[in-house]
Image (spheres, rainbow, N blue to C red):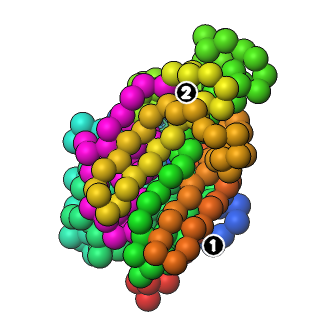
Amino acid sequence: MIVLYGFGGVGRTFAEVVYSRTNLKISAVFDSKGGAMKCGGFEKDEVKTLLKAPRGGVSELGVGARASLEEALRCAEVLVDASPPNYSNGEPAASAYRLALKSGLSVVTANKAPLALYFPEFEGKPVFYKATVMAGTPVVDLALGLREQRPLRIRGILNGTTNYILTRIDVDGLSFEEALGEAKAKGYVEPDPAIDLEGLDAAAKLAILANTLGARLTLGQVHREPLRYLGPRTKYVAEADLEAGNARVVPARLEPDDPLLLARYTTNAVEIATEVNLVRVFGKGAGRLETSLALLNDVVKALRACK
Ligand SMILES: NC(=O)c1ccc[n+]([C@@H]2O[C@H](COP(=O)([O-])OP(=O)(O)OC[C@H]3O[C@@H](n4cnc5c(N)ncnc54)[C@H](OP(=O)(O)O)[C@@H]3O)[C@@H](O)[C@H]2O)c1
């Protein structure tokens, strides 16, 4: 059984995917106003009704019983977090993870904030988070496989929204204002634009990746400069020197032969240099379906680990 914490774009798509592609069941759903639960798991038609709920409306529908998180956790094996990131203190998600872990559940998350802020606290516990970095491209799994190679550096384009804006300027000739307006109209920009345009999202992903590779880096240690267009081949580069312990997210003009230039529009890219290797990955960095499928992949892994 799955407790789904957050029932917006990603949460709803995840619920659809679970019921259309698997035999798994969701036993509770939470939004910002409360939760609804059914210990034996919702049936397909009940999920259909939940999917019709307006934002903030799941506990008002009469599907299942109103529930607190504590009650909901008693019936489930996995807590899936699709709630918004709170970069000041990770709440309320961080407390939800602590409660879930104390109650013997695994945590699967798309929310970057708790891990970007408190990675060491959750390390070694059943917390699965591949949806937080380049959702749709399992770069967290790749990073876990590189830990013994003494990782030295990360360099990447980790935010699709800002890369879209820069590509529209650089390749298609739009002004910064036009490209930003277009990105907003397409729904790419976070409700709080600073999360994208001041590098918070990319810095959070960089911190999560660095920790996954065995380094210690928190969000606050990543130096950030706001997005600016500096001229041809500007990219919003996230980079960390894992040995020196410094990290930054800054706009920079790349050399014409820099492979990161191949990451265009919403495509993301990451390079990880180790003592024996330089691995480079390009792929999708976001999207509701992509993120939901990454969550599902982690849920399956978490349930297997519980057995
Ligand atoms: N969209 C993507 O492509 C993508 C990719 C990777 C990661 N993510 C991450 O996935 C998460 C969800 O993204 P989204 O696009 O689905 O956001 P969203 O559409 O804003 O949905 C957020 C959901 O969380 C609920 N929520 C807010 N505060 C809550 C609380 N205190 N307790 C429980 N639920 C609460 C909201 O409730 P209401 O319905 O009442 O507003 C809403 O249902 C975010 O952390 C995001 O950064 C998203």
Residue 139 lies left or right of residue 30; in this view the side is right
| Residue for point 30% across, 74% down | 125
When asked about the image quadrant of residue 277, the answer is bottom right
For mark 1, what is the residue? 23
Does 179 appear above or below 305? above
When asked about the image quadrant of residue 148, the answer is bottom left
| Residue for point 32% across, 55% down | 115
Label annotation for residue 236: none
Q: Tell us which disc is closer to us: 1 or 2.
A: 2
| Secondary structure of the residue carrying numbered label 1 | loop
Whether residue 30 is visible: no
Specify the amino acid type for callout 1: Asn
- Front position in the image: 190 or 58: 190
Q: CA distance from mark 1 to mark 2?
A: 34 Å
Is 203 covered by the magenta stretch?
yes
Q: What residue range appears in magenta?
A: 200-227
Does 307 appear above or below 295? below
For mark 2, what is the residue? 189
